[in-house]
Amino acid sequence: MKALLLYSKASGRRDFSRYLSYVHKELDSVFETIDIVCPESQKEAFEIEKNAHEKYQVLIVVGGDGTFNNAINAVMQNEERPIIGYINNGTMGDAGRSFGVTKNIKSGIKVIKRQNIKPCDLGKITIDNESKYFSYMTAVGAFSDISYKTKNHKKSLGKLSYYFEAIRQVFKKRVISYKIFEDFSETGFVMILNGPYVGGFKVDKNNSMDDGLMELFASKGKAFNGLWSYVTKKNVYKLASDRIEIEVKGEDTTWCIDGEQFKSGNAVIETEKLAIRAFFKQ
């Protein structure tokens, strides 16, 4: 198989270019060809990833959750899609954890070298006829905007920037109203998961990426904007479905997808069953 590896100088906790010789050496024996490209922007990366299937059978993405989200939205533009490999060089790496990839670069290399390829689901969120795909989560309300609110501090503080912002939001009351069926309910935030991890924590150990379902979580409690319900694992409304239509009202109804800012408003979330193939640890 021929493989294309994309990395960015602009993103990531460390300068990945320092690891290029090691990565090339490790993967050269695995693939017939391993080409390494450093796009100048996310837009350029999107175009390269969208057309990668024309020449390559494998696309390896280096970066954080946002970089990975950019890649899956690119490959989903075509029916023919390369196998996805992931090397985490981001802050939290929730997308990679679902595949068994930790924050260690060597971890991603080992998973790819095992050649354990599995199909997995993606989520698709649609607001006002505009759709985006996500790999592990979409959320609205308190805490959902932590990732893009801390962008200026990620390189210097790493995951601490997330925790500091989370603590700040715990004591700043935020309420949204959401409706799935007939009546509106109030909560601090709503999140819909395709994988088990969010914010570096395993929220739902039983959540699978290949069961065709999204898992919705909404706190019934209001303490600390609903976060206490997740800590105690009590008073949390859960719903598993392949399609969720949700109306939202509040001061800020902007949705986050894989840590990236999307749009505000009512949303339809659907499962794209076994949409991509990826390298898994197990």
Image (cartoon, grey):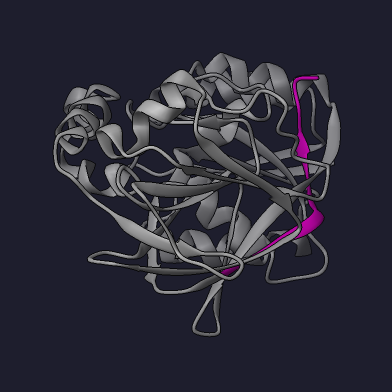
Q: Residue furthest front?
A: 183
Q: Which part of the image, by quadrant, shows the C terminus?
A: top right
Rendered residue at 79%/33% (across/down): 31
Residue 40 location, quadrant: bottom left
Q: Position of residue 96 (x, y in %)?
A: 58, 31
Instruction: Write the start and end of the magenta stretch as one range.
Output: 268-282
Report the magenta stretch's main SS.
strand
Q: Position of residue 18 (x, y in %)?
A: 39, 23
Nearer to the camera, 45 or 67: 67
Is residue 130 something one can see in this rendering?
Answer: yes
Residue 59 falls left or right of residue 226: right
Nearer to the camera, 116 or 41: 116
Rendered residue at 34%/41% (across/down): 11
- The relative height of residue 102 versus residue 235 in the rendered view (above or below) is above
Q: Position of residue 24 (x, y in %)?
A: 61, 26
- The relative height of residue 153 versus residue 19 in the rendered view (above or below) is below
Q: Which part of the image, by quadrant, shows the N terminus?
A: top right
Q: Is residue 263 magenta?
A: no
Nearer to the camera, 195 or 10: 195
